Image (spheres, grey):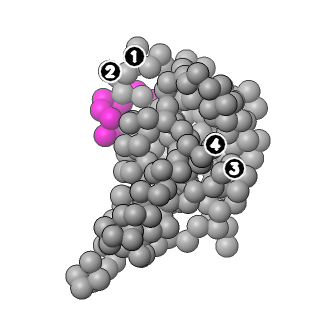
Amino acid sequence: MQRPMKKLAIYCGSATPQDKRYIDIARETGKMLASQGIGVVYGGGKVGLMGAVADGALSKGGEVIGVIPTALMDRELAHQGLTNLRVVDTMHQRKAAFTDLSDGFITLPGGVGTMDELWEAVSWAQLGYHAKPVGLLNAFGYYDGLLQFNAQMAQTGFVRAAHRDIIIAANTLEDLLARMKDFTPTRTVIQMRAEDL
């Protein structure tokens, strides 16, 4: 049975790389989600990949909810054309809102902040704080090294066998969305007995 996905949290960079393919893939992601009736929940900025995702979705009439901490309002140049811009006090509140408002997560290329958001979504799924699909769009092989590292953590035993496939990775958004819709939650740490840990 396919999972309903009415809104997805999109994690991506606020930077604008020289390689314009990254901006293009972000914009196309927003457009495709809107065309499928899937709302976007993201960091609220109007620059970089974040702005491109929002603009892409808005150009197709999609719902776009931005969540931005007060301290970053000016720094990230908050997008004023969104369906809803929520201002929170802390980064912790921002990430909690992403989880509360969305039916899953997609990570596009990004930097340290994007990695923080991705790994928290993975960690929370592993622990059992949410049961939502965690997608990774490996555009242009950007995340090849991260996927190799995730496999290394599993091979070494730092990621349990039950959790090695929490990250759903694909090279195209079409494939990623299809796999996320078919996602089945894993057995979480909370559900495990002490001897399984």
Residue 90 part of the magenta segment = yes
**Separation of disc 2 and disc 4 at Cα?**
33 Å
**Residue drawn at the location 63% of the way across and 44% of the way down:** 139
Q: In the image, is residue 139 above or below residue 151? A: above
Residue position marked by numbered label 2 in the rendering: 71
Q: Amino acid at mark 4?
A: Phe
Secondary structure at numbered mark 2? helix
List x then y, in percent, for residue 182. Answer: 64, 67
Query: Disc 4, disc 3: CB below 8 Å?
Result: no
The label number, if any, that marks residue 140 in the structure image: 4
Magenta stretch bounds:
84-93
Please name which of the two marks, 2 or 1, marks the residue nearer to the observer: 1
Query: Disc 2, disc 3: CB below 8 Å?
Result: no
* Mark positioned earlier in the residue sequence (2 or 3): 2
* Mark positioned earlier in the residue sequence (4 or 3): 4
Q: Amino acid at mark 2?
A: Ala
Query: Disc 2, disc 4: CB below 8 Å?
Result: no
Q: Residues within 10 Å of mark 2 (few under 14, many from 20)?
A: few
Please name which of the two marks, 2 or 3, marks the residue nearer to the observer: 3
Secondary structure at numbered mark 3? loop
**Separation of disc 4 and disc 3 at Cα?**
9 Å
* Mark positioned earlier in the residue sequence (4 or 1): 1
Q: Amino acid at mark 1?
A: Arg
The label number, if any, that marks residue 75 in the structure image: 1
**Separation of disc 1 and disc 3 at Cα?**
31 Å
